[in-house]
Image: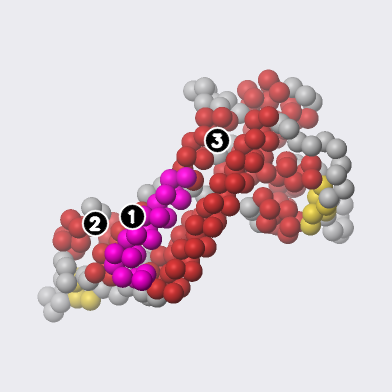
Amino acid sequence: MYKIGEISKLTGVKEGTIRFYEKCGFLEEVKRLPNGYRTYNDHHVFQVRLCDIVFDSFVNSRIRKSSIKLIETARVWDGGSFEEALNEYKALIKKDIRRTEKAINIALEWNINKADDGKIYTKKQAAELVGTTPEAIRNWERNGLIPQSEAYKKRYYSGEVLERLYVIRLLLDTGYSIMAILKFFRFMDEGKKKAAGKELTDPDGEDLQSRADYYLKALNKVLKDSKKIKNLALTHHLLV
């Protein structure tokens, strides 16, 4: 059994942060002594360390949602569910890395295939491939990032539009505004690549290449951290 100060020293996490994790329901129930002091066990040590790793950096809402599921399975100390959640978490990160690499290649080279290859995708299929939601794509349409479909008519997307969706997702993930993306596409569609590039360069000189590199680096760090989580789970006997 540990006091909160001991847990803090073991994990390197501040006492206030540990209380916050407890308040959020990220830790299993913490028992109290008759004098009111909290007492923690080895499960709590792992759960605090897990939260510390997971919340060390924010990448995107998709990965964050998956990481919360991971924390929830650790809280109930279910090894089977935790292993399943961890595998899903790692698979999602790897998929996001592949999508991001593809989007970077398209956005920086603007090598969208203008020829119609005949392939079409539903909104659900496009969302799954790009790594977003049908609702998000619907909002992109409303904001003019992609052509809107006719009212009350089911929308299908060509391969060219699909690659445009990849770029939109990347630009939003790396912090660009809807207005900046609209201007970027307008210049790109007019063949003005230099002007388009300026739209994605902030006053400090940081451009899409810099942001994309940083974003990809962050994704790879999260993947590396997922391996650290697995080793930690083995050490604490949550996984066998």
Amino acid type, label 1: Asp
Please tell me in which quadrant of the rendered image residue 184 appears.
top right
What residue is rendered at 75% in x and 36% in y?
Answer: 112
> Is residue 54 visible in the rendered structure shown here?
no
The residue that disc 3 covers is: 212
Residue at point 25% right, 54% down?
Answer: 13
Callout 2 amino acid: Thr
Mark 1 or mark 2, which has the lower sequence index? 2
Q: Is residue 236 above or below residue 212?
A: below
Instruction: Quote the CA–CA distance across marks 3 and 2.
Output: 32 Å
Which residue is under mark 1? 52
Left or right, residue 142 beside residue 85: right
Nearer to me, 94 or 240: 240
- Which quarter shows the N terminus? bottom left
Q: Quadrant of residue 159?
A: top right
User: Which coloring applies here?
Assistant: secondary structure
**Residue at position x 64%, y 40% in the image:** 103
Q: CA distance from mark 3 to mark 1?
A: 25 Å
Q: Check residue 223 for magenta coloring.
A: yes
Residue lying at the far left in this picture: please name it.
35
The x and y percentages for residue 43 are 28, 70
The image shows residue 236, relative to residue 115, as above or below, that is: below
Query: Can the viewer see residue 182?
Result: yes
Whichever of callouts 3 and 1 sits on the residue coming sooner in the sequence is 1
Residue interval drawn in magenta: 220-240
Name which residue lies at 79% across and 41% down.
Answer: 160
- The residue at which mark 2 appears reads as 11
Whole-angstrom CA distance, mark 1 to mark 2, is 9 Å
